[in-house]
Image: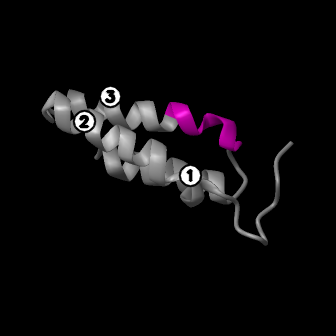
C-alpha cells in the first residue's frame, strides 16, 4: 500500500499537478506507512533512504507536462 501511494504522488509530480517541493513529504509518508503496516524499522528506513537518494528523477516532469508555479 505504501508503494502504491508513493508512486501515485510521484506520478502527480511528473504530470505537474503537485510541485516537486513536496517530494520529501511523499518519501516520509512512504516510510511512515511502511512502519504502520508492520515493516521492520531497519527495512523501512533502508527503503526510505533508497527513494531519497535514487528516486529523484522519477519525480521530474515529463517534457510535455504542464508546469505549476
- Cβ–Cβ under 8 Å for marks 2 and 3: no
Residue position for label 2: 44
Q: x, y (%) of residue 27? A: 45, 37
Residue 53: say if magenta: no
Q: Is residue 24 left or right of residue 37?
A: right
Foreground: disc 3 or disc 1: 1
- Point out the stretch of residues depicted in magenta: 19-25
Q: x, y (%) of residue 49? A: 38, 39
Helix, strand or loop at mark 2: helix
- Cβ–Cβ under 8 Å for marks 3 and 1: no
Q: Is residue 65 left or right of residue 3?
A: right
Earlier-in-chain disc, 2 versus 1: 2
Task: Give 29 or 55, whichever is nearer the viewer.
Answer: 55
Give the residue at x 68% y 36%: 21
Q: Quadrant of residue 23?
A: top right
Earlier-in-chain disc, 3 versus 1: 3
Which label is found at residue 56? 1
Earlier-in-chain disc, 2 versus 3: 3
Helix, strand or loop at mark 1: helix
Give the residue at x 45% y 54%: 7
Gap in Å between the C-alphas at discs 3 and 1? 19 Å
Gap in Å between the C-alphas at discs 2 and 1? 18 Å
Most common SS among magenta residues: helix
Q: In this picture, is 54 found above or below 64?
A: above
- Cβ–Cβ under 8 Å for marks 2 and 1: no
Q: In this picture, is 31 found above or below 18?
A: above
Give the residue at x 36% y 52%: 4
Q: Alpha-carbon neighbours of circle 1 within 10 Å: few (<14), some, or many (≥20)?
A: few
Q: Quadrant of residue 44?
A: top left
Q: In this picture, is 55 found above or below 39?
A: below
Residue position for label 3: 32
Q: Is residue 66 left or right of residue 12?
A: right
Amino acid at each position: 500500500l505504501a508503494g502504491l501511494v508513493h508512486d501515485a504522488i510521484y506520478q502527480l509530480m511528473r504530470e505537474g499537478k503537485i510541485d516537486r517541493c513536496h517530494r520529501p513529504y511523499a518519501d516520509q509518508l512512504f516510510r511512515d506507512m511502511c512502519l504502520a503496516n508492520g515493516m521492520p524499522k531497519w527495512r523501512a528506513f533502508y527503503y526510505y533512504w533508497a527513494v531519497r537518494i535514487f528516486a529523484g528523477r522519477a519525480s521530474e516532469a515529463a517534457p510535455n507536462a504542464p508546469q505549476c508555479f
